[in-house]
Structures are given as C-alpha cells and as structure tokens.
Image: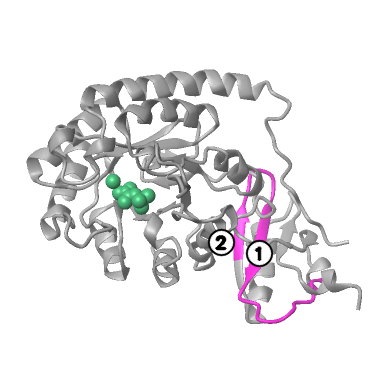
Amino acid sequence: MNEPSTYEPMLIVMKPSATAREVGAVVEIIEAIGFRAHPMPGATRTAIGITGNKGPIDGRRFENLPGVAEVIRVTKPYKLVTRDLRPDKTIVRAGDAAIGGEELAIIAGPCAIENRDQALAVARIVQQSGARFFRGCVWKARTSPYTFQGLGDEGWEILTEIREAFGLKIVTEALDEAGVDLVEQHGDVIQIGARNMQNYSLLKCAGRSRLPVLLKRGMAATLEEWLLAAEYIMAEGNYNVVLCERGVRTFAQHTRNTLDLASVPAVRRLSHLPVLVDPSHGTGAAYMVTPMARASVAVGADGLMIEVHNQPDRALSDGAQALTPEQYLSLVAEAHAIRGVARSIINQSPSATPSPGLVTAA
Ligand code: PEP
Ligand code: MN
C-alpha cells in the first residue's frame, strides 16, 4: 500500500469564502465519527484540526463537503501547535492585555511572593514600567526541600490585592492540579514551570482551564518535546498557550542555564504560538539579564519574563538573578526601543515570513 496519505488527514482547510455554517457542518461530521474537531479561525481562512483518532481516517470523505478547500496530512507529531493549522500568529489575551501582538509583552515580578510589603513594592515598580503582567510564585518548585518553598495561602490574597490595586494581570505557577484551580481563582495566566513541562496530567488539566497557559521549556527539553507539551494543552481545547524559553542545562558553568535564543526563530518557523524569553532563569546572574533581554527582543521574542526584587540581596529565592528596580526600569525602556528598531527592520526584510512548512497530501 503506497498511499497512506489519504488515510491520515489531520487538518481540513476551509475556503476563505466558507461560511460559519459550512465550518459547523464539517465539525459536526468529525464529532459524529468520534473524533475531536479544533476549528482555528485565521485572518484568511479557518482550518480544522482533528485529534482523538485512534486509527486511520479516510480524508476523502471531507474533500467534497461544501466550503472545504483541501485536506492536509500533518506529518509532524504535533497537529495543533503547527503553522499548518494556523499560518497567522496567535495572540493570547488575558482580559485587555495581550501576548503575541504588536506590543512587546513584559511579565515581571519577584521569583516568589515573600510577604505583602515586598510584593506590593515590586508590583508598584512593575506598574510604573508600563508592564501589564505581574509574576510571583506562591509555591516554589525548589531543587532542595530545605529551601524556601513559598508563602502558601497568604500569597493568594496578596496576588489578589495586587491585581485589584495595580490592574496588573497575574502570572503564577501551578505546581499541581489543585494549583490550577487556585490560579483560576486568583490569577490570569497559569504558569507551568520547567520542572513540570512533561507532567502530562498537569498539562491536560491546564488544557481544560479557561485561562491562558505560559509553558516554560523543560530543563533538557528538545524543541519537539516542548511543542508536544503545548500540544497536550491544546488537545484539551485550550488554544491560549504561550511558550517561554528559559534556558537548558549544558556543560557551561558561567551561567545557571544556557539560554537558547535560537529557539525563538525555531518556534516561529514551526508554530503560531507566541514565544517569550526569560533571561533571569536563563542566565541566573543579574548582570547578564539586561544584555540577554536585549538580544531576546532583537531575535524576535514576543515578550520577556524578568525577575525583579526591591531588595535582591535579601530575596528568599533567586536573588542572584533579580534586578533592582532601577535596573529593571532601564531594561524595559531599552527593550521597547530595540523592539521598535527590530520591527521596522524585520518588516522590510524578505526573510520576514518563514516558510510554514506545509505538508500537503498528494
Ligand atoms: C519561575 O519562573 O519562577 C521558575 C521556577 O522558572 P523555571 O520553571 O523556568 O525554572
Ligand atoms: Mn525564580
């Protein structure tokens, strides 16, 4: 049998002229035969991803339905994160704040919520910088069980207060499934940490949430493993996923992790999802954070995650990589300036639109 392509369709591309009713009819058929349909409206057309198929699907049954332009076989292991499904970039929204749009997204705050005074002092600086997102962990996934594990329940009240008082969107980590519920109550974006990138039950749980998910790259994750982790979230129906490069473990000793900035264009080539860079965990050293943040923006990151502390030398976790408020404020100003220059250059560059790498059924 030399024709597997006709039996492995995973993606149905609708015509630009297809009506909502035609899209709905295709979705209905996919569901009626026991699969899950993931319609993704784009700027020019809607594509419908299919998951949940345990065996082959005969794509020819879809080809002649009204509004269908083509049936595409996705040969990559991921189906929903790919630009094949959605050539336009996804903009992830948290209320009136966005990641992946025109504006560089800044997520900043302390490593951990330590106490009310510390968290509010840092939140004030974050708001002053014009950033829309405040980060801060209520629980910490620490390498040693004997180091500060996070403030616990009081931390949620502090985050709620910051959200209301400063109008900042709260990005905070869910370490487990109960954590997803708590972030849903008190936060705006669920962070999945590097150590949990392949915690598949947690990924599925976040995939059932209505909140956007910020998925950090695992400490030793390949690009494909990282994208497949995002796929787990999306396969559950949550398409609001933001990727965050935070460095990987290498032999290097001059940094905590090796920040892989090449992952930004690599993600961009394969996926429609926005990608951020975290130069704080990516380097582990405050003096490197600003230079690597500049580079991150220049390479095309959609935003930055930055750790900042009102008193870095007293921080209960990650003090060595925390910026002072002054350092942080100048970083943000520089980042916006570089973003402006980079966008005007990139917009004129012929290589601005990488090939989406479509694999079309013959
Ligand atoms: C964090 O952002 O607080 C964190 C723990 O980062 P990572 O999961 O990337 O180590
Ligand atoms: Mn940290």
Q: Are marks 1 and 2 in contact (CB under 8 Å)?
A: yes
Q: On the picture, is 2 further left or further right than 274? A: right
Q: Going 74% across and 50% down the picture, which residue do you hit?
A: 17
The image quadrant where one finds the N terminus is bottom right
Residue 109 placed where, x, y %? 25, 39
The reply to whether the magenta stretch includes residue 314 is no
State the residue in front, 214 or 186. 214
Residue 188 appears in the rendering: no
- Kindly identify which numbered label has been placed on residue 228: 2
Dividing the picture into quadrants, the one containing residue 198 is bottom left
Highlighted range, magenta: 38-61
State the residue in front, 295 or 45. 295
The residue under label 1 is which amino acid type?
Pro
Q: Going 81% across and 57% down the picture, which residue do you hit?
A: 360
State the residue in front, 357 or 164. 357
Q: On the picture, is 88 further left or further right than 104? A: right
Dividing the picture into quadrants, the one containing residue 222 is bottom right
Residue at mark 1: 77
State the residue in front, 30 or 225. 225
Crowding at label 2, few (<14), some or many (≥20) Cα neighbours within 10 Å?
many
